[in-house]
């Protein structure tokens, strides 16, 4: 029987067995409203520079990933224009003056089809890269992500995007429960809050990798380029 090419990547809590043919790069919610100055995230008082530092490492990784013809999948958090998939409690939580569905700086806030909901130009999906529109924080809830991964024969995910403690952590936990091995890249995920960034990563790799592995993009790029 032919063996499947597997490469060891330095990671925490121990090395990750990277199988390129069974691995997808999952880029979470790199949307204008979360990352761009003047967007919804900044309107809420968040420091978008904490997220913007992830753009360049994601771009570099994506370029190499595409060069090797490996699988890429993007996600976007957002809702139907008629708000039928928006839980009322998600709409009112936070008690902010403007919330999901209201007119925002880049169109209706977190509504599919609006400018602010779309992915930033620097990481814009290629036509053959699936984009998962998710109504929740986790990319598996109420989406066809699991079916797509199964059809592609994917068993492991390299996870990047924003925000570390919210949509990245929720997705990694959902993936873990569905049997996927997740490698999270610390320089390619971001939080508005530096301590949540630190603890969000610690929670993934704690207890022998209870939800997955953590490394940075230089480790995987070194293997891909070697
Ligand atoms: C948030 C996300 N933070 N993509 N969304 O509401 O993490």
Image: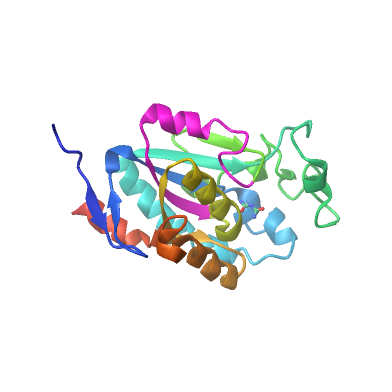
Quadrant placement of the N terminus: top left
Would you say 118 lies left or right of 62 here?
right
Left or right: 125 with respect to 155? right
Q: Position of residue 131 (x, y in %)?
A: 52, 35
Q: Residue furthest front?
A: 207
Please tell me whether residue 150 is drawn above or below residue 10 in the rendered image.
above
Colour basis: rainbow
Q: Quadrant of residue 226?
A: bottom left
- In the foreground, 83 or 210: 210
Which residue lies at the image location 16% right of the left edge and 38% below the top edge? 3
Q: Position of residue 198 (x, y in %)?
A: 52, 70
Q: Is residue 18 above or below residue 49?
A: above
Farthest-out residue, top = 151
- The spot of residue 152 in percent (x, y) is 38, 30
Residue 115 versus residue 135: which sits nearer the camera? 135
Judge from the rendering whether residue 33 lies leftward or rightward of residue 29; answer left or right.
right
Nearer the observer, 195 or 110:
195
In this picture, is 139 found above or below 144? below
Res 20 quadrant in image: top left
Residue stretch rendered in magenta on the structure = 137-161
- Residue 45, position in %: x, y? 73, 65
Residue at x 58% of width, y 60% of height: 165
Seen as rendered, the residue at the extreme left is: 1
Taking the magenta stretch, the answer to whether it contains residue 10 is no
Q: Is residue 128 visible?
A: no
Residue 141 colored magenta?
yes
Whether residue 208 is visible, yes or no, is: yes
């Amino acid at each position: 029987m032919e063996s499947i090419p597997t490469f060891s990547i330095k990671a925490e809590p121990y090395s990750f067995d990277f199988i390129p043919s069974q691995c997808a790069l999952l880029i979470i919610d790199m949307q204008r409203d979360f990352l761009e100055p003047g967007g919804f995230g900044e309107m809420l008082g968040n420091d978008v520079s904490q997220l913007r530092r992830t753009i360049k490492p994601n771009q570099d990784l994506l370029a190499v990933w595409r060069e090797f013809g490996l699988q890429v999948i993007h996600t976007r958090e957002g809702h139907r224009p008629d708000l039928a998939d928006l839980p009322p409690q998600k709409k009112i939580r936070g008690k902010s003056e403007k919330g999901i569905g209201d007119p925002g700086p880049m169109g209706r806030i977190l509504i599919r089809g609006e400018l602010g909901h779309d992915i930033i130009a620097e990481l814009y999906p290629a036509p053959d890269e699936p984009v998962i529109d998710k109504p929740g924080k986790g990319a598996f809830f109420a989406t066809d992500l699991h079916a797509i991964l199964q059809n592609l024969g994917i068993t492991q995910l390299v996870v990047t995007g924003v925000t570390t403690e919210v949509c990245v952590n929720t997705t990694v936990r959902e993936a873990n429960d569905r049997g996927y091995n997740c490698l999270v890249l610390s320089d390619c995920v971001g939080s508005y809050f530096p301590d949540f960034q630190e603890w969000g990563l610690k929670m993934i790799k704690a207890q022998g990798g209870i939800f997955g592995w953590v490394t940075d993009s230089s480790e995987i790029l070194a293997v891909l380029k070697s």
